[in-house]
Image: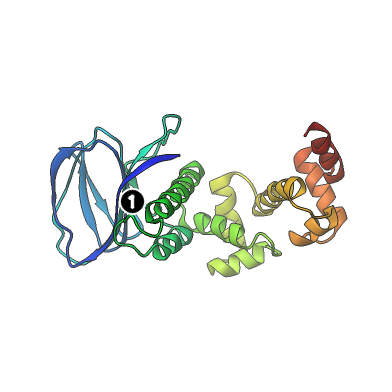
Amino acid sequence: MVKDLIYYSNMAVKCCFDIPSHKVEYYELTFVLKGTMTYYANGKRIVLKKDDGVFLKPGTIRSREKGEGYVHYVSFNFLLKPEARLLFDEHLKNVLNDDMKKLISVFHFKHITDKFHAKEKCCNILNYILCEIIDFTKIKSSNEYVMRIFNYVVEHINEKITLKTVAGFLHLSKEYTAYIFKKETGTTLSSYINEQKILISEKLILKENMTLSEIALHLNFANYDYFSKTFKRYKGISPSEYKKLKAHTD
């Protein structure tokens, strides 16, 4: 996705410096981890708060106000491969998730250098972050609880996930948890969990040296029969039929 990384900075400062108005010739992605920053993109004022991001395309007339307090921010300036297309909003509200923050914290350099494969590492981190934002924008949910549910399911996909466990994680009632999820996504929480487990089971069937029973156990289905019935409901064929079909076509 990323063709070249032009600039990277991970700065924690008493106040950010201003940037005069000029046209950028690259993509810019900046996140605020703490504090606030104010950008202008083609005359539009964008106030970034904690966990917000700004995404600017080449040709954007961009400026930044001088800050008035402590701010920790991370910026990437980069070019994309010709086939890559990113349809992000300029103001990415509450986009930073825990995984993205962990990656940013692991890459401890304040700027990219020519040592320790820093540029290659930073490019890989940026590619991961861009994929996370693509997923974030596809979800199109403004409900913070629903976003936390998505993250919870990803992190606990190998465990037994129930409405009760998710509601407990959110500190909400089971009834309200079920209501907001169905309202925002159009599907039930149990259906979504099973769908995600089946998507992973497909990859395990194709790429891992595991029996179907081991896959069912790995994804915490109650038993193989339940796994097989669930798989058939979503894919139209049983796991064993799917495995034979893929083996034949490959």
Q: What is the x, y in percent for residue 220?
A: 75, 62
Marker count (numbered): 1
Q: Is residue 170 left or right of residue 118?
A: right
Residue for badge 1: 53
Helix, strand or loop at label 1? It is strand
Foreground pick, 13 / 68:
13
Foreground pick, 65 / 12:
12
The residue carrying pointer 1 sits among few (fewer than 14), some (14 to 19) or many (20 or more) residues within 10 Å by Cα, namely many
Colour convention of the picture: rainbow
Quadrant (top left/top right/bottom left/bottom right) for the N terminus: top left
Vertically, is 59 above or below 78?
A: above
Vertically, is 151 above or below 169?
A: above
The residue located at (18%, 59%) in the rendering is 16
The residue located at (50%, 55%) in the rendering is 147
Q: What is the x, y in percent for residue 244?
A: 85, 39
Under mark 1, the amino acid is Gly
Q: What is the x, y in percent for residue 18?
A: 13, 52
Q: What is the x, y in percent for residue 78?
A: 33, 42
